[in-house]
Amino acid sequence: MTQIFSPAADTWLRLFLLGSLALTAGGVVMIVGVARSDYVTSTNFRPSQPIPFSHRHHAGELGIDCRYCHSSVEKGPHAGLPPTATCMTCHSQIWTNASMLKPVRQSLAKGKPIEWTRVAKLPDYVFFRHDIHIAKGVGCETCHGRIDEMALTYRAKAFTMQFCLDCHRDPAPNVRPVDAITTMGWKPHGDARAAGNAIAAHENIRLGELTHCYVCHR
Amino acid sequence: MPQQPQSSDDPDRPRLWSGIEELSGDPSFENWVNAEFPSAMELPPTARRQFLKLMGASFALAGLTACEKSPFVAALPYVNQPADEAPGVPRYYATAVTFEGYAQPVIATTYAGRPTKLDGNPDHPVTQGRSDVFMQAAVLGLYDTDRAQGPTRRGEPATWKDVAGYIDEQRENWATTQGEGLRLLIGSTASPTLLRQIDELLAQFPKARIHTHEAAARMARHRLTQAAYGQALDVHYTLDACDVVVSFDDDFLGPGPDQVRNARAWSAARRRNANEPGIRLFVAEPVPSLTGVVATRLVADVQRLPILTQAFAARAGVEGASMPDISGPERDWIEAAAAACKAVAGRVLIACGGCCDDTAALWIARINDALKNIGRTLNFTRPVAGPTPAGTINDLVADMNAGNVDTLIVVDANPAYAAPMSLGFADALKKVSATVHVGLQQDETGYRCEWQFPLTHALESWSDARAVDGTATILQPTVAPFYDVRSVHQIFGMLLGEIDPTRDGAVRATWQTTFGGDFDKHWAQALHDGFISGAAPFVTENVSAQAIGRPAPAAQIGEGEFDVIFHPDPTIWDGRFANVGWLQELPKPLTTLTWGNAVSIGPLLAKHFGLVNGDHVEVAIGDRHIEGPVWVMPGQAEHAIALSMGYGRTRAGRVGDSLGYNAFEVMPADGARLAKGNLRKVGGHETLAVTQLHHRMEGFDFVREVNASNPTLPKAEQQPSFYPPWPSSKNAWGMVIDLDSCIGCNACVVACTAENNVPVVGKEQVEAGREMHWLRIARYYKGDVETPRSFFQPVPCMHCEEAPCEMGCPVHATTHSPEGVNQMVYNRCIGTRTCSSFCPYKVRRFNFYDFRAPEDSPLHAADNPDVTVRSRGVMEKCTYCTQRIEAAHAVADKDSRAIRDGEVMTACQSACPTRAITFGDINDPQSEVSRLKRDGRHYALLEEQGTRPRTTYLARWRDDAGDHQG
């Protein structure tokens, strides 16, 4: 009787099994990795803007308060982008002829909005409210990162459901005193958890009630 | 299996049936109604294999939908942001929409300047925040893409400059003739500014004439007061001051301008006492109405009404009334009603409706005189709406045919459709050289006129209008006009010779005299409040029936003839709302018919002709006839045929065209709402898009009743459960629906549609059982088909503590919140529909198609931005208006306080004209909803299922004394 399998067949089979296992495991790692990658979550990417607006200059170097431009952050769900008129409060006085600011002047002249590219975006099925987060001690920096160091604005944190839920499950490490909401680089004194718990208690954060679906999806 | 209806031994748990098909006990029909989705019954048996294959593939591919990269999109800020405008924060305006010219005061919610939702104005003295279907749906009319979008002449686009030139030319002609040959035809209006402008126009051109026309209006009531008191008067009921109301065909709780006021007052009176109903109704009527449902009802043919009124007059001791021959049930009803009236002397009202003839109206007037009701429970004022005096459309058509009319201006009326066809308005119009239609749409009349001047919608206009009691509201625009349109006051300004009138000038001028010196302060106050406080200028008239002669003996009906009764449609009225999808898809009360009308006949007549629902019949009046499907209405009188107006339109728009039959085809030329006619069976049958047999529950005692002698239902034992109870957070939401107050008006359903972006699916989909309303008003009957008692039951999601749907979902797309809300997460749903098959209440709705409006449609602006617009393949259902709960949480949390009782109002609750729906925190023992859950009438639907629903009901009161039919 002739041999059907060559002496190497056993080795090939083992290699094949090992290979498929590695491929499956690698595939899973790759899919999870890609899903969390900067590319898919659009983090650390600086989209081109009609005006190369620098938060580093305005918020960092000049120290303009976040709420000067994002004026409805305490009033409603959206922080709001500044209307052209807000830009012109200063730029009708300084840098009035800068070529960089031409789109701002044109917007005002033509009554057409400046077409910014949105950097911080949540999916349509997420109903996020800025006002309640600000009121309960979640600082701008917690979600948006060190805006004061960004020359061109980028998404510092991946806005995944896990990112939201980590904090909704356990807000204490992520809250700060309400008077430090817009402070960049804020650090708690001493024990971060104890400080966070004290703030959560003071602000009546409804611990344990913030993770059900209808809090964000409806 | 649904039980066959049969007499029940337990009066608290009556056996109910929901359609005459069910009474016949046909097994194939039973299979059909038992199917989860009746249309799936027609699938071949192998479809299951195919279905499983597709389901497997869907499961495998569902995960891929998550692989989308978060895109970068444009963000557009304002150039100049309006002061105190914050994106995503709603703003509210107190204004009004109009219905038959009367103001329906509203608070309009706007997002980024776009109105999305109308609610009643809670401070208004008449409506007190309550609403009806027309008010709720008015916002969709604003975004109607079939509106007239700019002036046209002979169908060609024109400019307002052309219009101004034309009017100028015409004015020169009128000036030479003093307006000879100029006629205006105006729909009923209660706008002081418009009435002032009409007077000014008549002053400028004294030979011009005004005519007024409303097809469905309360002209019927004016006919009755004319017969009884010799003058046209508005009738105002003070139901709060009544203990007993006896109505002869007056559907005062039914749809119409008066519905909100009467329903609110009736329900307040009904709830006056803790342990018995506070007001009782006795209704004798040929065609079942919403008032009849909540009353001790006598089925009475039209020709019996004068006899019954005479009998009641005799029984009430009215001078000159002798007791006529009446049948046993009639005698019982009259005895019961008369005894009830006697027991509460002075707190009684006798009401008179459209099927009453002059004799009956006169008898009723005399009874009201004898019982001294006028001034106590019944008031009369001169008509709130105008213009008066005005000619009728019949005078106008006669003059048009005689060649006496050179220019006809039709304002906010559609006589080419909504007037009797035998009048021949459309033909007479051809004899008029200059014709202008001023209206929101280029409808049948606009199409036939030389000019179309498009009007602004009430939500875009500066105007004013009076409510049914005469309280005036200044209408302020919630948004700038979308199209090149002008308000009726601007157009009248042009007719009066003004050049380019401002949008609010005429309204300001009207109120200048009333407000006097401190104008700006009063004006701002009136706009803020949404109505003008102070005495209504309509004083009660002192009238008496004695001046008119004796009632004539009643006329008899001929052999083989029937009484044909014309009703305005309960959802699209006389056709003016035909292009509003929300109203077309709204199941009509009692029939649950959508997207069409039917010829309603009684069960005896159906038996006689061998007719079943959907069979085609021909109704002939004189030499005119129409053909339509028949609807066998349980409880309709033997000789009555009811037709509903509003359908058969040809130029309503994409939604409302070519549906149903046109009742105006056979309406007598004098516009009478009652005529003698014949019925004939013709071949043909059609499927009617009725919803009552969809979404059926298993059982038979959904609606419970109690009576005053035994006002407490037995407490049900809680069914055991394998599962531990859910931990509750601070708030636990719950709802109680008082079935005793529900009049089945559907305002809650439209409010829910508007608030929650519920799609309109169309006639075919409704026929397939796929309507999407999150809340259904189930209608049940008890007793025999000739004289049944009817029940309404609103059924939203029950938010069960032990929810079968939550156990069924394979992907956890429906979960339980710590506040007890059964949550539906669209972005997680993969559309297996398991939850729906597990739901014993059948309240879940599935998006079989993508029902979203096209991307460029203006309808998107009507969507509530706080609620997801669902796409194809996901399940949806009532959420307890979670967006309102979360918004209330945000407001309360910002102040670090608890949510107050009444702070969260669901859309259905705030719309309900009778306050039948109460929502709140059941963890708070002081809350209104907790108090109602402790009431003796409290029960849970299908409690034997052990689902522990959060939405529960209060049983209906049974008025035992008059319950001879039960």
Image: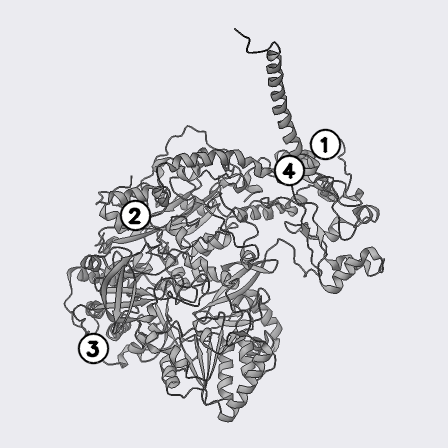
Spatial separation of the CA atoms under disc 3 and disc 4: 81 Å
Q: Which residue is mark 3?
A: B552
Marks 3 & 4, CB-CB < 8 Å contact = no
Q: Which residue is mark 2?
A: B706
Mark drawn on residue A160: 4
Which mark is first along the chain, 2 or 3? 3
Q: Amino acid at mark 2?
A: Val
Instruction: Tell me if residue B819 can be seen.
Output: yes
Please rate how many residues cluster around mark 4, counting C-alpha atoms within 10 Å: few if below 14, some from 14 to 19, many from 20. Answer: few
Q: Quadrant of residue A31?
A: top right
Spatial separation of the CA atoms under disc 3 and disc 2: 43 Å
Q: Amino acid at mark 4?
A: Thr
B248 left or right of B150 in image: left
**x, y percent for residue B14:** 26, 46
Q: Nearer the viewer, residue B703 or B929?
A: B703
Q: Chain of mark 2?
A: B
Q: Which residue is mark 1?
A: A192
**Which mark's residue is nearer the viewer, 2 or 4?**
4
Mark drawn on residue B340: none
Q: How is the image coloured?
A: one colour
